[in-house]
Image (cartoon, grey):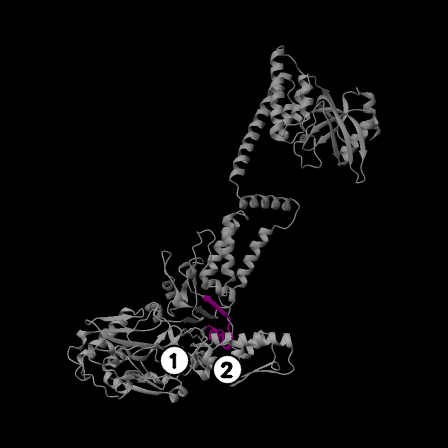
């Protein structure tokens, strides 16, 4: 401090000239002891001067707390004259000071001083011109009661403070102490500071306190109501918002802005359709305006992620030549020529045409013939990603098309999900078990597939969730089914159907040698020096332990042998390789499950071998007819369907119409009952293709002529005796081949389908084409002459054994 300013203290009334300490964001009232941290040079100089001359300090609030160097106009005129109790200098240059407010004062004049504010002040005494002590006491009591309620609601002031307040009897001191602890604005506190009349000050504080209490009560109500309504997501949102606010105050990165920037960056890098780009931009703009952790923001963010994660233009290029692709297909699967040919044709066309729509194939065949695995092999041969959806039991349309975004937890359909998973827009897409789709009140998934599998429509497939046109035309769709009948006609029409019949014995043998044995040896930890399968052993397993169109059971039986050999190796550790020969197979697999090459053993009356098609391939069907005394009834058993029962009626009608030719009495049917039975009665059977077998069994039973046991037949019969074509010829002939049948009778109109039957199977069978039932009877019935002129009696009944 300069000498001139030091003289001011000596020359003037020392009680009126004191240093000024401008305060930021705080008002110090009389009767209060307050710690202050002081960092500004002028303020520190003012404190040092006050300490040096043992003068008081005048503490007054700044109007604008952000100003570091306030002027006279930036400081309120009314403040508190106080004394310095303790002053402590800190290592960082700041000062911690403990001050006590004594009484109010008003600035009369700023005295010239460069180091700090030096002011001439006028000490202000409290005005108590209200002689009504009762009113003051009432106000004081009300203030104390209200302050107690304020303490309970605020929870920011220590509870012990209530004891201090209750003990204060001086109204002026009560007013100043209470206002210090109220959570009100600086301007409101300054207004209280400038009220000199004690009664008016008490009223102003009481009014201010009631206003604060009302706010606190409303806050408490809101908190209680929000607490009841708040769910976990809202709690998370609230906490995250607080976290973001803290991070923002601390100057940390704003994650939400970074996330928006990341989405915009991904949008620039991704090659989307024009419609999708526009949609994403709209959604990002919408997201920017939302609270980051709100439920709606999460929905929008997920939607944007789905669009940006889709492989709009990402495709895999075929790196193989046509010959290499063909070699890969042959390496993975034995046979299946039609499927392989179709794939090679597609690849050939693709090499000539820039934009070639993916084929939509439907592989139909019994279980275990390799429908799904060939789809995987196609993906490998074409260097494409492979995705598979099992449609078995799917009954909700939303599984295909997805849900609209308005639903909670909405997601795209399986088509879009699988493409995202594949990461490529031209995968091989396997829709497994398409014949087992269901439908209910939630919609029909097969109808939703119409758009997916239509080459003209799938260029703009619209998923309910994305609500954007998505091009599926580059995808190679391969669907699989066991039967075609359950697939709706419009869906069949959109697919190129390729039938895969069962494997022949020789094909199964090759598959076992090339694929199954090595696969199961590896799975069971065996090496070539541990085990060897003889050809005879494999044939015995195929013939006597499996009866199927595919190779699943064959694989299981080979796996069973491998497991038992593995156990043997661990237990006994044999010195040499274990050879699985034909005669040792029962040791590992037990008693044979099926008879191979054994028909009924001998020719019998009324027993014909028919051929049936099932979902698992072709089967031999034993059809029995029995005659007994009766009243002309026709009995049909074996769980026959309506069509099959009508075939029996048609067969009987034809035989009755030709009774004279067959040497039967004119009214023979009136004195007998005819019972037609198809064994395995628990299994439903239907279809017209057993018509000629029914007629043969009935004719045999009536004429008492034996039917050749080595002959199997299939064909629909008309009332005029014509034999009509049937379906599933390849599967039926393969079944006859498996059953060691020598001769197969089929309709003449099916001659064109015989090319599908493998050449080696055709060589082992005598296949006879017929147009009329008379031709069938000439071939199937043995030429033994029987006198049938005597009346039919009960002893003419035929007892037959069913054929397995």
Q: Residues within 10 Å of mark 1 (few under 14, many from 20)?
A: many
The residue singled out by tag 1 in the image is 735
Q: Is 528 placed left or right of 763 in the picture? A: right
Q: Is 125 positioned to the left or the right of 502 in the image?
A: right
Q: Quarter of the image containing the C terminus?
A: bottom left
**Label 2 secondary element:** helix
**How many numbered marks does the figure carry?**
2
Does residue 377 show up magenta in the picture?
yes
Question: Which percent across, then down, holds residue 514?
Answer: 52, 82
Q: Residue at x 36, y 56 (%)?
A: 441
Q: Position of residue 47 (x, y in %)?
A: 79, 30
| Residue 800 vs residue 53, the one in the foreground | 800
Relative vertical location of residue 14 with respect to residue 216 in this rendering, above or below: above
Crowd rating for badge 2 (residues with CA inside 10 Å; few <14, some 14–19, many 20+): many
Q: CA distance from mark 1 to mark 2?
A: 19 Å
Q: Which residues are magenta?
A: 372-389
Residue of label 2: 538
Q: Earlier in the sequence, mark 1 or mark 2?
A: 2
Residue at the image position 39 percent from the left and 59 percent from the top? 397
Residue 111 location, quadrant: top right
Task: Mark 1 and mark 2 in contact? Answer it, CB < 8 Å.
Answer: no
């Amino acid at each position: 401090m300069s000498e001139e300013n030091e003289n001011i203290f000596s020359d003037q009334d020392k009680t009126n000239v004191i240093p000024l300490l401008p305060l930021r964001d705080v008002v110090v009232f009389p009767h209060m002891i307050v710690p202050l941290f002081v960092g500004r040079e002028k303020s520190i100089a003012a404190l040092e001067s006050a300490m040096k001359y043992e003068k008081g300090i005048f503490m007054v609030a700044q109007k604008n707390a952000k100003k570091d160097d306030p002027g006279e106009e930036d400081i309120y005129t009314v403040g508190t004259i106080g004394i310095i109790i303790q002053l402590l200098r800190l290592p960082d240059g700041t000062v911690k000071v403990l001050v006590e407010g004594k009484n109010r004062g008003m600035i009369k004049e700023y005295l010239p001083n460069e180091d700090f504010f030096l002011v001439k002040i006028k000490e202000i005494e409290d005005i108590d011109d209200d002689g009504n002590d009762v009113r003051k006491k009432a106000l004081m009591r009300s203030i104390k009661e209200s302050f107690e309620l304020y303490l309970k609601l605020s929870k920011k002031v220590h509870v012990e403070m209530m004891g201090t307040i209750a003990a204060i009897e001086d109204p002026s001191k009560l007013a100043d102490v209470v206002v210090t602890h109220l959570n009100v604005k600086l301007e409101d506190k300054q207004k209280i500071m400038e009220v000199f009349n004690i009664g008016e000050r008490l009223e102003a504080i009481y009014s201010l306190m009631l206003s604060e209490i009302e706010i606190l009560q409303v806050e408490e109500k809101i908190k209680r109501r929000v607490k009841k309504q708040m769910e976990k997501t809202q709690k998370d949102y609230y906490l995250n918002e607080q976290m973001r606010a803290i991070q923002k105050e601390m100057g940390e990165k704003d994650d939400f802005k970074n996330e928006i920037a990341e989405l915009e960056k991904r949008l620039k890098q991704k090659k989307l359709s024009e419609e999708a780009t526009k949609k994403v931009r709209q959604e990002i703009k919408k997201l920017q305006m939302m609270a980051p952790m709100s439920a709606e923001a999460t929905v929008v963010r997920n939607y944007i992620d789905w669009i940006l994660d889709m492989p709009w233009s990402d495709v895999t290029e075929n790196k193989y030549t046509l010959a290499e692709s063909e070699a890969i297909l042959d390496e993975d699967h034995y046979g299946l020529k039609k499927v392989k040919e179709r794939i090679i044709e597609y690849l050939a066309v693709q090499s000539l045409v820039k934009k070639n729509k993916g084929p939509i194939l439907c592989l139909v065949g019994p279980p275990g013939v390799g429908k799904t695995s060939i789809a995987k092999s196609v993906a490998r041969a074409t260097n494409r990603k492979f995705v598979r959806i099992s449609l078995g039991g799917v009954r909700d349309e939303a599984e295909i098309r997805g849900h609209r975004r308005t639903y909670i937890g909405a997601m795209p359909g399986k088509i879009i999900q699988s493409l995202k998973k594949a990461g490529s827009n031209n995968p091989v897409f396997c829709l497994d078990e398409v014949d087992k789709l269901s439908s209910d009140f939630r919609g029909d998934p097969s109808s939703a597939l119409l758009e997916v599998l239509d080459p003209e429509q799938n260029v703009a497939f619209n998923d309910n969730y994305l609500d954007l046109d998505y091009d599926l035309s580059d995808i190679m769709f391969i669907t699989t089914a066991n039967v075609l009948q359950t697939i709706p006609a419009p869906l069949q029409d959109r697919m190129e159907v390729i039938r895969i019949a069962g494997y022949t014995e020789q094909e199964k043998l090759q598959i076992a040698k090339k694929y199954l044995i090595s696969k199961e040896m590896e799975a069971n930890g065996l090496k070539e020096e541990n085990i060897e399968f003889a050809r005879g052993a494999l044939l015995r397993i195929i013939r006597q332990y499996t009866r199927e169109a595919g190779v699943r059971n064959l694989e299981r039986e080979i796996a069973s042998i491998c497991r038992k050999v593995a156990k043997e190796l661990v237990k006994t550790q044999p010195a040499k390789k274990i050879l699985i020969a034909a005669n040792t197979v029962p040791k590992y697999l037990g008693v044979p499950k099926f008879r191979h090459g054994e028909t009924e053993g001998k020719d019998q009356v009324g027993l014909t071998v028919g051929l049936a098609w099932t979902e698992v391939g072709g089967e031999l069907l034993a059809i029995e007819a029995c005659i007994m005394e009766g009243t002309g009834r026709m009995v049909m058993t074996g769980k026959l369907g309506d069509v099959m029962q009508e075939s029996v009626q048609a067969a009987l009608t034809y035989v009755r119409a030709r009774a004279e030719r067959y040497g039967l009495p004119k009214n023979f049917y009136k004195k007998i009952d005819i019972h037609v039975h198809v064994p395995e009665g628990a299994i439903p059977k239907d279809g017209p293709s057993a018509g000629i077998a029914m007629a043969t069994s009935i004719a045999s039973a009536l004429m008492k002529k034996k039917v050749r046991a080595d002959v199997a037949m299939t064909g629909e019969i008309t009332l005029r005796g014509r034999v009509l074509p049937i379906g599933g010829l390849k599967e039926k002939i393969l079944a006859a081949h498996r059953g060691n049948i020598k001769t197969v009778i089929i309709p003449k109109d099916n001659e064109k389908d015989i090319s599908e039957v493998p050449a080696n199977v055709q060589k082992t069978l005598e296949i006879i084409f017929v147009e009329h039932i008379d031709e069938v009877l000439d071939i199937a019935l043995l030429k033994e002459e029987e006198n049938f002129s005597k009346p039919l009696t009960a002893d003419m009944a035929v007892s037959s054994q069913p054929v397995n």
